Image: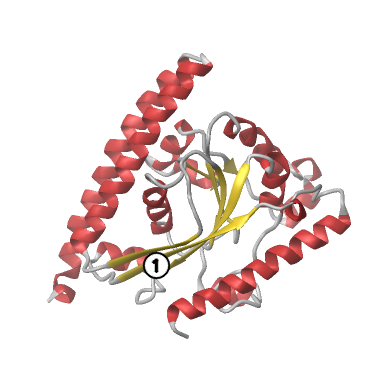
Amino acid sequence: MRTYLAPLIFVVHTSLQIANLALWATLVVSVGLVKFLLPAPRLQRQLLNIMHVFMHCFGRISVMMIKGFNKVNIDYNTEGTLSKESWYLLIANHLSYLDIVLLIDFTRGRIPPPKFFLKQELIWLPFVGLGAWALDMPFMKRYSRAYIAKHPEKKGQDIETTKRFCQKFKTQPTTVINFVEGTRFTPAKHQAKGSQFTHLLPPKAGGIAFTLATMGELFTNILDVSLLYPNNPRYPMIAMLSGQMTHIVVDVNVLNVTSDVQGDYFEDNAFRTRFQQWLNDLWLTKDSRISQLLGR
């Protein structure tokens, strides 16, 4: 019966999700403008905390609607201890824009508010772009190798953005979130990149290496998060909006931050090799874990 109703569910659910996003994003941006115009650090922190409440309200209501329109089980599995008073670097695979909603809701009451590293293009996305800007989330400009070859002055610009925002994140407990693959997984991208992993794209090491170098002494742990939509792997967002989502897994592995993952990634060749090997080994373990969770 729900299959026949899927088009109607899609229209109603999408409209409500957009309204929810618009409401809380408008509140975030409104307070963000006040924060921008009143540059007193203590007041800015207080206003930012209010904006974090708005962000978590958005995530909570969005997930409530997901559960209301879908007969879905959402499994949160955590191996390790979490705290709202710590700093975390959260690295995750990326399958859908739905990932962002789930991670926002996951952080609520468990760990500090999230700061996503976002693609520059998302700043133009209605409600999302201005809301993320107001919440002090960094927008990363990606350049192709061909573009860098023609414009060498642009090399390392994303690292400078990382450095600038990491300084902001030092003032209060924060969860820095990085989708290490750099883009959403699709079978076409998986094939084009010649990925050695079954369920993942190759990880990009530079961004998280620099984040660890800048904030490593603050991070209590690295959170290795695997996001899965076992019965709707290809188009999870459409399935969710249409009432066809049945199972979501958010699997969290709490890792220690050791001296082995802190160093000068761009100048120390030996460290860069070690770090890339560490990240590839982590991704191999993650790939195996995903196969286990999927029962394959």
Relative image position of residue 283 (x, y in whole percent): 63, 69
Q: So how many labels did they put on this image?
A: 1
Relative image position of residue 45 (x, y in whole percent): 47, 24
- Indicate the amino acid at tag 1: Val
Relative image position of residue 237 (x, y in whole percent): 35, 63
What residue is drawn where x is 45% and y is 31%? 134
- Asked if 159 appears above or below 257 in the picture, the reply is above
Residue of label 1: 249
- Asked if 41 appears above or below 157 in the picture, the reply is above
Looking at the image, what colour scheme do you see? secondary structure
What residue is drawn where x is 41% and y is 18%? 34
Using the image as rendered, state which of residue 107 and residue 134 is in the foreground: 107
Task: Looking at this view, name the residue that lies furthest to the left.
Answer: 1
Task: Looking at this view, name the residue that lies furthest to the bottom.
Answer: 296
Relative image position of residue 117 (x, y in whole percent): 56, 46
Q: How many residues crowd mark 1 within 10 Å: few (<14), some (14–19), many (20+)?
A: many
